[in-house]
Amino acid sequence: MGPTSLDKIRTLQRNPANIRNLCILAHVDHGKTTLADCLVASNGIISSRLAGKLRYLDSREDEQVRGITMKSSAISLHYNNGDQDYLINLIDSPGHVDFSSEVSTAVRLCDGAIVVVDAVEGVCPQTQVVLRQAWLENIKPVLLINKIDRLILELKLTSLEAFTHLQKILEQVNALTGSLFTSKVLEERAEKQKEETQEWEASSEDQVYDWSAGLEEADDSHLYFSPDQGNVVFASAIDGWGFSIQQFASLHSQRMGIKEEVLLKTLWGDFYVNAKAKRIMKGAQAKGKKPLFVQLVLDNIWSLYDAVVTRRDKAKVEKVVTSLGLKVMARDLSHSDPKVLLSAICRQWLPVSEAVLLMVCKKLPSPLDMASERVEKLMSVGARRFDSLPEQTKDLKTAFLQCSSGESAPVIIFVAKMFVVETKALPQFRHRHLNQEEIAQRRELARQRHAEKMIASKTGPERDKDISPSDSAPAECQPTGLSAGIRGLEESVLKSATLSDSPVCPPFTPLNFEATPIVRVAIEPKHPSEMPKLVRGMRLLNQADPCAEVLIQETGEHVLVTAGEVHLQRCLDDLRDRFAKVEISVSKPIIPFRETVIRPPKVDMVNEDLGRQQKVAVIHQVKEEASQARLSDTLHLGPDGLVTLTTPNRQALVSVRAGPLPPEVTGLLESSSELIRTLELMNMSLREGRPMDVNPGTLEDIVKLKDQLKNLFQGRKWRNAVERIWAFGPRRYGPNILLNNIKEYSRPSVWQCLDPAGAEAAVLRDLDNSIISGFQLATLSGPMCEEPLMGVCFSIERWDMLSSANPVAPPEQRDLMEEYSNTHEVSQSTSEEMTSGSNKEEQRFDTASADCYGPVSGQLIAATKEACRHAFQAQPQRLMAAMYTCDIMATAEVLGRVYGVLGKREGRVLHEEMKEGTDMFLIKAVLPIAESFGFADEIRKRTSGLASPQLLFSHWEVISSDPYWVPTTEEEYLHFGEKADSDNQALKYMNAVRRRKGLYVEEKIVEHAEKQRTLSKNK
Ligand SMILES: Nc1nc2c(ncn2[C@@H]2O[C@H](COP(=O)(O)OP(=O)(O)OP(=O)(O)O)[C@@H](O)[C@H]2O)c(=O)[nH]1
Ligand SMILES: [Mg+2]
């Protein structure tokens, strides 16, 4: 078929029933782009001989060089099936984890998906992810098992073994779908139960609830992939062939005289042909017979490969070619590479494009058949249920389902992605020769524009934009149910948006992103004068990439945050060549850390019990303790880690103790940050006297969060802790907690919005906010290397305010003052009069203090912050590293090397399993992000490309070694020596961060100063 004309495509666009919007999804390298090539070739856009080699949709240079897809690309294809013409809008998505955001945007735009699975590798981590994404978006998937040629040529399986292998893969995929389905049914059941219990409580009649209802009665048969349902294609995209069992069923039904439907039901399964009785019987395996699928389908393919590739039997090949009625060119027949001949035969015999396009048109929905469940899900943002939306909004659903392009129908557009397109590349700007008439028209237009400008400048500056006539002309109408490009949204849309002419249309639910941006680099232009260009370029990049983040750090650096190393590389290339077009210099990746405290360890570094050992006096330890006990006159450190700090003007005093939060609490806070943010907003508006309207779902979630926290805070130490939470931090929603442990201060709790009536009893003390601000500052950057804190609980034990007019110092402060004056007495040996003189001076200094030190609130903030920092330092401090989970697939022979590389980079293997039926091992490991740069490359090099890892940010983990550690016990001395100069990973990380931030790093540059001897001969 030749290329389809634009007009034809336009007519096809007007018939939504025959439109299929679909994307190809898979794990990396399972052959999506190769498959897309075959489909593109079927439209004559590229030669079918080049299909699979060209990778037409990988249009970027770096995609071709690296051999992986980095951006989704779309193409419209035309497919004719007898009397029906279809328009297929195809999106090829990337499979690499770094680009999973591209998959998220692609699935939002499609109604169906082709999930590709490699026949050798089977279900891989990204296969699971894409299936889940398709599920979450409610789009229908079909399955394509690709690379079957590898089973023949690489694994050298017999056709029977291959059949068992394929069955297993299908089972794996179906098991995944099954688990997605069960979790959904259980969720729905739980919701239903809740509703029914509520009803039941309300009606208080006797009702019996059937607990078994749900799973058993839910029909899920339509969800699964099964060749007899017609939603599975077996293929080898590289050799250009593919088939569904329908094709073989109709072929053999004529030859064997068996009804097609019967053959269709039995072709995939444990059935065989009884030649004598001319019947199809069950139980092929038990009787040792060849199953139908092997006999009628696989054997043909196997013998073709055998004849063409393995034995190169020319006579047999010719026989096959004539029996299949194919035409093969002489140059293909005599080509030295047997694969050329093979694909020439296969492309004609079982063209993969035909099998796939037919399946897609039959099995995937058109925009008209969109599931109503999907529409409801798109419209119900957050925890809001569709039923609770206003009536007019609910009416939009019908318009949506009808896909009508009538005059009165509402316009709803979802902007899934922003693209940056060179102006030159737009059709209207493409260079083209004009005829005389057009030239005259343009001249006229230019004249008009000039005249308008003159008027505009006369009428004043109310027209801030010069709108050219072409801009204000109505855009050409786009039929419904399609994806389209819209120009000119860059000022109003950042990354995605919902556009509508109906004010009741709610914004669609946000896209589901799997990857978190985590790798950050600082960027600056080579020539400082090009800064504005860079800033503009980074803004464009931020808009165009759903997963990249661009921000300006407090230090003033321009920072780019990406999902991983490959993603980073692509973003930088884009920035350099397309968006900013300037030379840039890029810092080393900035690796994030978190600071935390832990419980005091019970054993020392050599695993000896600390309690029974004698401490060896270390000079600097003693020094440190002494300096900690009395750091300054306003700070007091108690033996149990209680830090008391007085503001410089002596008007306020706070006592803080720090401690670790239970890890589960930290995890919960981390995952519910959005909810906590909402909670804060609600509290704030409540305090301002205008309670916020929130949907009941969110309130429920907050109550759930509170209950979960209550369950997790177990033990005497945490009694009633949930009610005493003062604030979360940093930024008011982070994973650290400020507790109110002050006996005489009962403060409204953070949960007051749940019970607005009851909250009024408790009142906020003045300057309450300063304490919170101090805590926020302290948690935003810790004392170790100014990184945010995580999992730390600060409890305020005491907070006294002394009014400046009546400075009655609390006992402790009086102690402090006395001690202070005592030391002065000792050191200066002053006389009586002088001491009393200084006391007087102090009182005077108190009254004048407000002026001298600034407002009290500011001092209190600083004091709380300092107190928190010191309290933090009084505990055993640790760094937390961001960790990747890493999935590696490797063959047995390179397994050792993979472990070697993992071990060198502080990785930890979680589990390892062998993939059934192959010699592949699937390894799951965790790896600190700090050690991950160049990891994928190193693994690939060391294993000659046989293993490639997929890295995905998973969690934060405490680094067990103490960065401040020095040997203190006898055993440690024996083991590490006095200097203890073995590697301390945590210290290395900490110093690297401190150095980057320009903080002081305690390091000995010269360990042993010795005079150097000159080794040159003539001296
Ligand atoms: N043996 C064999 N190799 C194949 C087949 N299909 C694709 N390949 C090879 O698999 C590799 C990856 O193919 P691609 O099409 O780039 O894979 P992809 O899924 O698009 O990869 P990403 O876009 O990076 O996720 C290429 O080297 C292809 O030549 C097949 O049917 N058989
Ligand atoms: Mg690809």
Image (cartoon, rainbow, N blue to C red):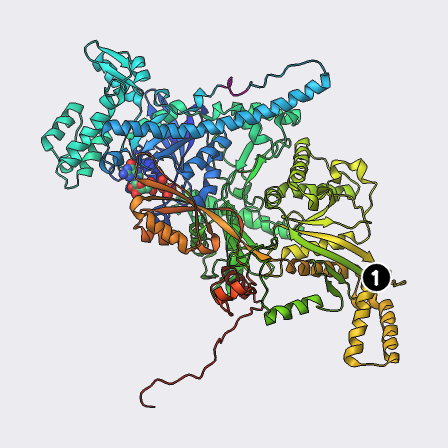
Please provide the residue range marked out in magenta: 214-218
**x then y, percent, for residue 83:** 34, 20
Secondary structure under tag 1 reads: helix
Quadrant of the frame with the C terminus: bottom left
What crowding class fits label 1: few (fewer than 14 Cα within 10 Å), some (14-19), or many (20 or more)? few
**x then y, percent, for residue 956:** 54, 49
The residue to which callout 1 is attached is 811
Tell me the residue at 56%/70% (across/down).
1002
Q: Residue furthest right?
A: 806
Quadrant of the frame with the N terminus: top left
As for residue 794 lying within the magenta part, the answer is: no
Horizontal side of 434 relative to 789 (left or right) equals: left
- The residue lying toward the viewer, choosing from 747 and 998, is 747
Q: Residue furthest top?
A: 277
Q: Is residue 497 visible?
A: yes
Say which amino acid is labelled 1: Pro
